[in-house]
Amino acid sequence: MHRSSLPPHFGQRRFLSWNDQQRARHGGRVQKVSVDAGFTCPNRDGSKGIGGCTFCNNDGFTPSYLRDQTDITRQIDTGLDFFTRRYPNTRHFVAYFQAYSNTYASVDQLRTVYQAALAHPKIDGLVIGTRPDCVPDAVLDYLAELSHSKIVELELGLESCDDATLARVNRGHNFAEAQDAIRRAAARGLQVAAHLMFDLPGESRDSMLAGADKLSALPLTSLKLHQLQVIKHTVLANQWRRDPASVPIMGATDYFERVVDFLERLSPTIAIQRIGSEVPPALKLAPDWNLRLHQLLPQVEALLLARDTWQGRLYQGQ
């Protein structure tokens, strides 16, 4: 296939890269600096349930410095010290509120927390990770107001587009709530990212691929794809130990095939932020792929090339 057959906005890739898109939009790399503001979730504090999602142990995704200090400015300083050495040509840094549900508070409380991050002279914006059922209109209005002068991205953890799967992993919301949240946020001009996890217990190949069609019909700007990982000190880990067959784990080759199948059906206008995740080996029970995070994307790109396919090739939308 000739390069001219690919959507021109893909650049040199066979999918729409969020990183490339941000470089073009902002004149250079945009780096997220993780911040933990001490939020919780409605399926942890008893509002909708307890215990949180069955797969969730935030220690698996939280930099160690966030567990050592609570002051937001100090967290940012520590993160900046690392990233400025690793990526010296970065043009913009944004505070990434990642742990748990970072809109699960009143607007006044959120304003205090967000402004503490934005007051840092090297922070140009915010990425707010949260749940679809934690974004009331008042919060979206406030984020839209911030977005007029700052980089603002709302990252919604969907995890699945299948209601039975969402119930099985104790999410505490359904896909209709996700659709509603995405539409209300996008209507305010916000950049909306979604987080999707492949291979959750009970999820089939067909339901995962149907998710590509469902998400393509929504005004999403970007998407994160992650493989299922069994992490210590989670309900899922206990389930896996008791009955491994109840938590089937996808092999690396099957995962890469599934990602490519998914990308083929996904709208070519949705940028891809990442196609995998990584937790510290001391916390991970499965899978054992013997691959680091930076090795996953080249595998997917090689498979796209080998299959002579690209994001959106089978997309049925307009």
Image (spheres, grey):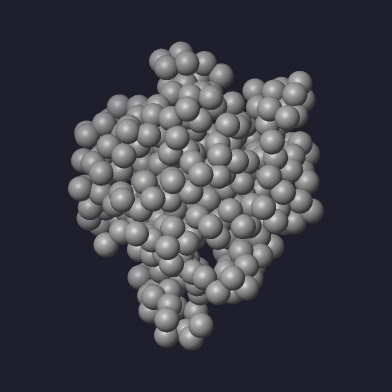
The x, y position of residue 213, in whole percent, is 38, 50
- Find residue 259 and report its image quarter: bottom right
Say if residue 22 shows up in the picture. Answer: no
Please state if 109 lies on the left or on the right of 287 as rendered: left
Q: How many marks?
A: 0
Residue drawn at 35 percent across, 53 percent down: 216
15 w.r.t. 280: above or below: below
The percent position of residue 131, horizontal first and vertical second, equals: 40, 34
Is 46 located above or below residue 306 in the figure?
Answer: above
Q: Give the residue at x 57% y 48%.
A: 226
Q: Nearer the viewer, residue 129 or 83?
A: 129
> Left of 284 or right of it: where is 142?
left
Above or below 10: residue 72: above
- Residue 236 shows up from this direction: yes
Pick the residue in front: 82 or 56: 56
Residue 16: percent from left, percent from top = 44, 67
Instruction: Give the residue displayed 64% in from the left and 52% down from the top.
Output: 255
In the rendered structure, the answer to whether residue 297 lies left or right of residue 168 reads: right
Report the residue at 48% width, 59% height from top.
Answer: 263
- Left/right of residue 120 with respect to residue 63 in the rendered view: left
The single residue placed furthest to the top in the displayed view is 46
The quadrant of the rendering that contains the C terminus is bottom left
Q: Nearer the viewer, residue 249 or 280?
A: 249
